[in-house]
């Protein structure tokens, strides 16, 4: 979720019901070198609490020092990323690469837990590849090092984000009688029905939503409503989607500056416009737009679309919207 889970995005997710938000992952090496971009990723607003700051790295020293530095920002939790499978991270021995060096992962975890005075959590994957998935034992070992909770993505590192997430091992971890810390599951939860199915199948204490929330912060509201009341709310109107998009864009460019804010926001348009017919030409223009004024002009054109488009959202034809499917 690099360049996605920034402060404006986290704030919007909290607004629509996320119980906890997590920062973009921050390089421990960059942080201890006092890199401006690394430090900027640790900043958050009070409306985001509870918030976890997430760090990654390949050495015990850098992770411990980075953890201590992160405490200056007073987060609610500190999260250790041992699950990122991206090549540029793995080739440095960080992220999911630590699944090939369990002793180092455990040493790193223990050092960070002992260095800070707040809950430390871990996010990882089921294993390195199909033949090496030690997550059930690994979860116990990490628990023994003092972590407060563990989040497990139901894929191996080799899978990256392909194929389908396998939650069976996540369920085994949760059902392990020796586990007494919260176990959270992650992977392919993009709607309330899938969320409930995963809770029912595995008994996990919580679910992490990643890609499913990009341009769709309403997913948190919808899942909460389905789990607590057995119904899915009516989907947001055209006007509401556009209002949230414009607010998100404005906050993003204010935080990052015009050029970076415009470029990094491009990944959100498809999510916000999903299910809206007739807007593909506008999406193409938006991802090519070079400046804030140009983007705002296109969004104003979209706002003036005929009402016929506004009443033709995908959610309007969903038979579960506003009804109980239980």
Image (cartoon, grey):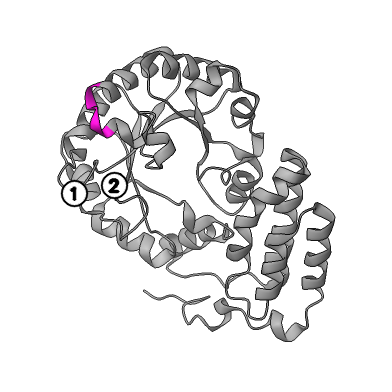
- Toward the bottom, the furthest residue is 308
Q: Which image quadrant for residue 142? A: top left
Q: Residue at x 58, y 47 (%)?
A: 14
- The answer to whether residue 102 is magenta is yes
Q: Residue at x 44, y 16 (%)?
A: 62
- The answer to whether residue 14 is magenta is no
Q: Residue 173, image x and y in percent?
A: 21, 42
137 vs 14: above or below: above
Crowding near pointer 1: few (<14 within 10 Å), some, many (20+)? few
Q: Which image quadrant for residue 297? A: bottom right
Crowding near pointer 2: few (<14 within 10 Å), some, many (20+)? some
Q: Are marks 1 and 2 in contact (CB under 8 Å)?
A: yes
Q: Which mark is residue 130?
A: 1
Q: Residue 104, image x and y in percent?
A: 27, 21
Q: Read off the residue under disc 2.
A: 158
Q: State the SS at label 1.
A: loop
Q: CA distance from mark 1 to mark 2?
A: 8 Å
Q: State the SS at label 2.
A: loop
23 vs 158: above or below: above
């Amino acid at each position: 979720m690099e360049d996605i889970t920034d402060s404006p995005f986290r704030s919007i997710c909290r607004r629509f019901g996320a119980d906890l938000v997590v920062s973009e992952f921050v390089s421990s090496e960059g942080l201890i070198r006092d890199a401006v971009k690394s430090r900027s990723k640790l900043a958050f607003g009070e409306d985001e609490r509870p918030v976890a700051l997430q760090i990654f790295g390949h050495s015990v020293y850098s992770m411990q020092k980075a953890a201590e530095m992160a405490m200056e920002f007073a987060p609610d939790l500190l999260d250790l990323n041992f699950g990122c499978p991206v090549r540029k991270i793995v080739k440095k021995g960080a992220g999911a690469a630590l699944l090939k060096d369990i002793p180092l992962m455990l040493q790193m975890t223990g050092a960070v837990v002992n260095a800070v005075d707040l809950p430390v959590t871990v996010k990882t994957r089921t294993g390195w590849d199909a033949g090496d998935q030690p997550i059930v034992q690994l979860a116990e070992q990490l628990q023994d090092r003092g972590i407060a909770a563990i989040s497990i993505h139901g894929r191996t590192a080799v899978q990256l984000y392909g194929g389908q997430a396998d939650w069976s091992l996540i369920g085994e971890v949760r059902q392990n009688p020796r586990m007494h810390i919260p176990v959270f599951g992650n992977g392919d939860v993009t709607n309330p029905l899938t969320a409930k199915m995963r809770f029912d199948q595995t008994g996990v204490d919580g679910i992490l939503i990643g890609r499913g929330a990009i341009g769709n912060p309403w997913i948190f509201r919808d899942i909460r409503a389905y789990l607590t009341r057995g119904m899915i709310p009516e989907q947001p109107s055209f006007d509401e989607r556009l209002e949230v998009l414009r607010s998100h864009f404005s906050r993003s460019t204010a935080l990052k500056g015009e050029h970076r804010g415009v470029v990094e926001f491009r990944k959100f348009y498809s999510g916000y416009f999903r299910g809206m017919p007739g807007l593909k030409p506008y999406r193409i223009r938006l991802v090519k737009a070079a400046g804030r004024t140009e983007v705002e002009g296109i969004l104003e054109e979209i706002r003036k679309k005929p009402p016929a488009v506004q009443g033709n959202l995908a959610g309007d034809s969903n038979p579960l919207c506003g009804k109980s499917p239980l």
